[in-house]
């Protein structure tokens, strides 16, 4: 028994009637039995129910919490099957009538479904690619590109496309570790959306999602219509009546769950292999922390007048490069690092966040530069233009370059050029290491940093001294914003406001407020100061970064971290008390090679005292009133066993804010020779000891003299003065090693050279001197080998020297060693024999001692203390070169350093016998032990 279908009634007509009655609510209608039609309908519906059950089972499984949502498969296949079955079961004309009936009931507007061919619009390009016929420009552009490529190839390597694709990548394009890429298209007026979507749909690596953005576009409806026409669940349309400009697409990128993001301008039609190429390169170790693209720019280079041109300056090699540039026949056949990318950006989703660390210079333009700048500054991530295969458009990221010349959105107006010039200059001035900076590393003497206008004023004298000294370079970096505006800093320095706008290094505004805003946290300030100064140090390689000592603790930390990160050279942070800045103007006279050693030395004050509390108090007062430049200066008190109560109380109560205080007291009386020689021993080759007896008094400038002399003559790699063993604070008025002890005036003696020149003398000073660590170790060993209680038993007898008969004197042994080995001490020489220390000649172990037959006149030993800046008295206002320092022998007679060594060798009484004409003893500076004889 079979079912017969009425030939005049189609199954579609019957179903249409059923749906119409159902939708219209016509319950009165009576359906006649249609067994053949209803049987077929029941079978189809049963099959659809089964299919839906299978679909729902899979859907529920993948929605479970145990499944990683990022790996959720695409269900568009189910949608396509359902559509095919709908067409089979319900003919289109029936479905459309049903929809019309339903929509009429619901009162909804019917939007007819369209296909891409009906919805798409296309750009018409009616001109050929622009080509330049300017031979000069072609030559200039090609020269610069070759220089850039040569530098990059030499320093970090540049690969061809084939070499890049041969590199190992974390992404497997065909395996389970295939990357997920979200593509973001931003459209306003152009008619290129369909071309982009068609290209993306045919990629050899399928995309994860495509987000089409329409922000404030007058073509929003047509753009939406195009997206809907593709009917692909992976392609989404996002719109807003507000125009989020160029940054909106990157804000959207923050929402992606994909591994990688590909942001495209509307004039970029990528070849079908671009996603595969970009993903592969982004997965390599070398380029994983990078942003990749197809078009980029190299920013301007510095001109001969030390200014930077506009990046759009015509007929200028220094204006930089646009890569690739078909107009000048420049193609990119090797990966090239650029200063920023244009039109497309491919990067990890994680890196996108970096764009928003600092508030952009403007939201109207420049997101391309801002992205590359922020990535380099905060993530050490660089920007690269990928090479292409010229013969295969599938490898091109910009398959139709002429599009860049069609729409008004790419036209560069004069005001836009000015804005972008200001933007890249501010980036360069706050630490953006451009290709110019990498290829032409600078070398300056000092970078001054001021976080407030008050700090600018405090540093001004030293900054001006650096800038006015021939051969010196120094720039000022200011925090900017609400902390220290550039214009306010310029005003404090009496510089014109234009210095804040001209593209020339002088005042560098870090715009700290761009990150900190109204935040009370120290983190943004520390972050931007560190990142900016790190970049500036890398660009300019300053010998020192100078700031005030009372700088905010977090800013200090940021400066030190930035200085430590300099891999091009050595940079030291120098923190100066504001009040001391005018007293260290000699800093500008030091060589740039000496400046980095500013903090290297450690000068300790070592006081020998016993029972002269009043004298000690005077010494301590003078030490407290001196300038220490924020250096750590340890102090030690060395007391013999017979120290009195008043001295102990004074020592215990003395406050020393410049470093640790150490007290030492002997159990058994040792006498002056032990008290002095055992008061200090160097802990390293940078440990210097100042020895002071308690009847000494020092000048406020004594520490500055020591530091200046050490930097000029000991810590300058270009100075060779190994004979220098100590620096004296005192200028003697007598020739004390001869019996007659005649008066002597250094100012008068050296007036034919310069009345106030410092000089080298073979006589060590015991009334205030700093001793060098290597020579002091050597002295310890020497005195241990030569010490005798009876001076007549000492094998060293210097001709005509009254030191031969000195007893219990540590200085006698030091004189012997210096004479035998040709060592010298540096002495000051100022008007009226003013010095950095004076001896008050008060009764003690030597002065007025019963066994001392020599009578001492106080007037022969006391000298005035310097109470003003000594720099003004020096020859030319600075310490003379080491080669121009006059030298004297033990008896105050002029003699060259070689002559001093010859005299010691001739005596032939050192601990090792050497040729008494050409050799002297050399030692192991680590132990001080004599090593061998060496020619001098």
Image (cartoon, rainbow, N blue to C red):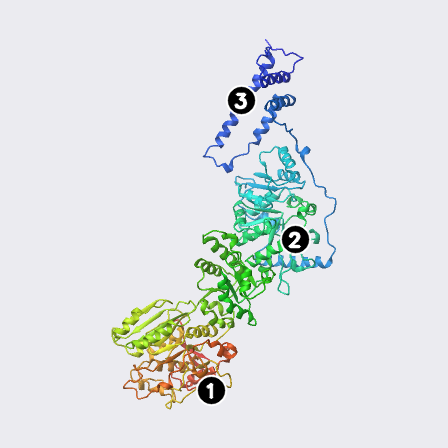
Q: Position of residue 539 (x, y in %)?
A: 55, 61
Residue at mark 3: 49
Q: Position of residue 807 (x, y in %)?
A: 31, 84
Mark closer to the chain start, 2 or 1: 2
The front one of 382 and 847 is 847
Residue at mark 1: 749
Could you say whether the residue bearing mark 2 is in a helix, strand or loop? helix
The front one of 233 and 271 is 233
Instruction: Judge from the rendering whether residue 639 lies leftward or rightward of residue 917; answer left or right.
Output: left
Q: Residue furthest top?
A: 1
Per the model, the C-alpha gap separating discs 2 and 1 is 70 Å
Could you say whether the residue bearing mark 1 is in a helix, strand or loop? helix
Instruction: Judge from the rendering whether residue 660 lies leftward or rightward of residue 710; answer left or right.
Output: left
Question: Does residue 569 lie above or below 648 as drawn?
Answer: above
- Examine the rendering and report whether any part of residue 910 can be seen: no
Per the model, the C-alpha gap separating discs 3 and 1 is 117 Å
């Amino acid at each position: 028994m079979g079912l017969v279908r009425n030939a005049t009634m189609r199954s579609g007509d019957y179903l249409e009637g059923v749906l119409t009655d159902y939708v219209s609510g016509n319950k009165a209608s009576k359906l006649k039995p249609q067994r053949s039609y209803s049987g077929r309908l029941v079978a189809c519906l049963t099959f659809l129910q089964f299919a839906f059950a299978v679909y729902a089972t899979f859907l529920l499984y993948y929605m479970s919490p145990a499944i990683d949502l990022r790996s959720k498969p695409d269900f568009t296949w189910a949608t396509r099957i359902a559509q095919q079955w709908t067409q089979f079961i319900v003919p289109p004309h029936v479905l459309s009538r049903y929809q019309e009936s339903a929509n009429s009931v619901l009162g909804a507007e019917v939007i007819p479904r369209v296909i891409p061919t009906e919805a798409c619009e296309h750009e018409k390009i009616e001109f050929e690619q622009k080509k330049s016929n300017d031979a000069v420009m072609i030559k200039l552009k090609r020269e610069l590109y070759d220089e850039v490529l040569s530098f990059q190839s030499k320093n970090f390597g540049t690969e061809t496309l084939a070499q890049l694709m041969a590199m190992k990548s974390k992404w497997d394009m065909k395996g389970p570790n295939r990357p997920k890429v979200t593509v973001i298209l931003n459209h306003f007026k152009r008619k290129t959306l369909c071309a982009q979507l068609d290209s993306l749909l045919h990629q050899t690596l399928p995309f994860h999602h495509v987000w089409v953005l329409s922000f404030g576009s007058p073509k929003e409806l047509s753009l939406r219509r195009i997206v809907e026409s593709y009917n692909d669940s992976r392609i989404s349309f996002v719109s807003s009546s507000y125009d989020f400009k160029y940054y909106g697409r990157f804000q959207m990128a923050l929402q992606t769950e994909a591994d990688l993001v590909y942001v495209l301008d509307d004039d970029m039609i990528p070849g079908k292999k671009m996603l595969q190429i970009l993903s592969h390169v982004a997965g390599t170790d070398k380029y994983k922390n990078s942003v990749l693209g197809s078009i980029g720019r190299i920013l301007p280079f510095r001109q001969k007048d030390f200014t930077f041109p506009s990046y759009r300056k015509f007929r200028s090699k220094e204006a930089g490069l646009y890569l690739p540039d078909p107009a000048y026949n420049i193609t990119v056949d090797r990966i090239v690092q650029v200063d920023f990318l244009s039109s497309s950006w491919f990067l990890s989703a994680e890196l996108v966040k970096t764009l928003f660390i600092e508030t952009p210079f403007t939201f109207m333009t420049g997101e391309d530069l801002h992205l590359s700048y922020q990535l380099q500054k905060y993530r050490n991530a660089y920007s690269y233009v990928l090479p292409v295969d010229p013969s295969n458009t599938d490898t091109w990221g910009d398959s139709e370059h002429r599009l860049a010349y069609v729409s008004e959105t790419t036209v560069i107006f004069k005001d836009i050029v000015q804005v972008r010039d200001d933007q890249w200059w501010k980036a360069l001035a706050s630490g953006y290491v451009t290709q110019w900076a990498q290829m032409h590393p600078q070398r300056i003497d000092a970078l001054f940093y001021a976080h407030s206008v008050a700090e600018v004023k405090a540093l001004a004298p030293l900054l001006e001294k650096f800038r006015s000294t021939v051969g010196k370079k120094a720039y000022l970096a200011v925090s900017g914003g609400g902390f220290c505006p550039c214009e306010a800093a310029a005003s404090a320095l009496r510089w014109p406001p234009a210095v804040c706008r001209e593209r020339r290094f002088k005042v560098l505004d870090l715009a700290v407020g761009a990150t900190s805003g109204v935040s009370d946290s120290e983190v943004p300030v520390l972050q931007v100061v560190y990142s900016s100064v790190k970049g500036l140090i890398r660009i300019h390689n300053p010998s020192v970064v100078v700031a005030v000592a009372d700088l905010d603790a977090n800013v200090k930390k940021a400066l030190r971290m930035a200085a430590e990160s300099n891999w091009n050279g050595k940079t030291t942070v120098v923190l100066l008390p504001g009040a001391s800045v005018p007293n260290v103007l000699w800093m500008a006279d030091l060589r740039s090679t000496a400046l980095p050693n500013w903090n290297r030395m450690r000068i300790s004050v070592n006081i020998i005292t016993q029972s002269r509390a009043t004298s000690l108090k005077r010494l301590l007062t003078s030490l407290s009133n001196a300038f220490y430049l924020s250096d750590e200066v340890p102090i030690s008190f060395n007391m013999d066993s017979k120290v009195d109560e008043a001295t102990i109380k004074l020592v215990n109560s003395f406050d020393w804010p410049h470093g640790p205080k150490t007290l030492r007291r002997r159990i058994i009386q040792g006498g002056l020779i032990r008290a002095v020689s055992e008061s200090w021993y160097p802990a390293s080759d940078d440990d210097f000891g100042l020895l002071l007896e308690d009847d000494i008094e020092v000048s406020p400038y004594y520490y500055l003299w020591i530091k200046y002399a050490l930097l000029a003559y000991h810590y300058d790699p270009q100075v060779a003065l190994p004979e220098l063993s100590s620096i004296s604070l005192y200028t003697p008025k007598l020739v004390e090693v001869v019996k007659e002890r005649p008066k002597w005036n250094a100012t008068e003696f050296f007036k034919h050279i310069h009345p106030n020149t410092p000089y080298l003398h073979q006589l060590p000073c015991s009334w205030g001197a700093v001793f060098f660590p290597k020579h002091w170790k050597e002295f310890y060993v020497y005195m241990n080998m030569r010490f005798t209680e009876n001076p007549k038993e000492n094998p060293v007898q210097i001709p005509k020297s009254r030191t031969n008969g000195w007893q219990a004197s540590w200085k006698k042994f030091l004189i012997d060693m210096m004479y035998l080995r040709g060592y010298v001490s540096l002495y000051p020489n100022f008007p009226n024999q003013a010095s950095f220390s004076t001896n008050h000649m008060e009764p003690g172990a030597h002065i007025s001692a019963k066994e001392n037959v020599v009578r001492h006149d106080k007037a022969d030993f006391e000298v005035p203390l310097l109470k003003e800046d000594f720099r003004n008295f020096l020859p030319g206002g600075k310490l003379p070169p080491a080669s121009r320092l006059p030298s004297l022998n033990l008896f105050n007679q002029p003699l060259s350093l070689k002559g001093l060594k010859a005299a010691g060798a001739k005596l032939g009484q050192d601990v090792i016998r050497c040729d008494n004409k050409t050799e002297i003893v050399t030692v192991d500076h680590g132990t001080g032990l004599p090593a061998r004889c060496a020619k001098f």
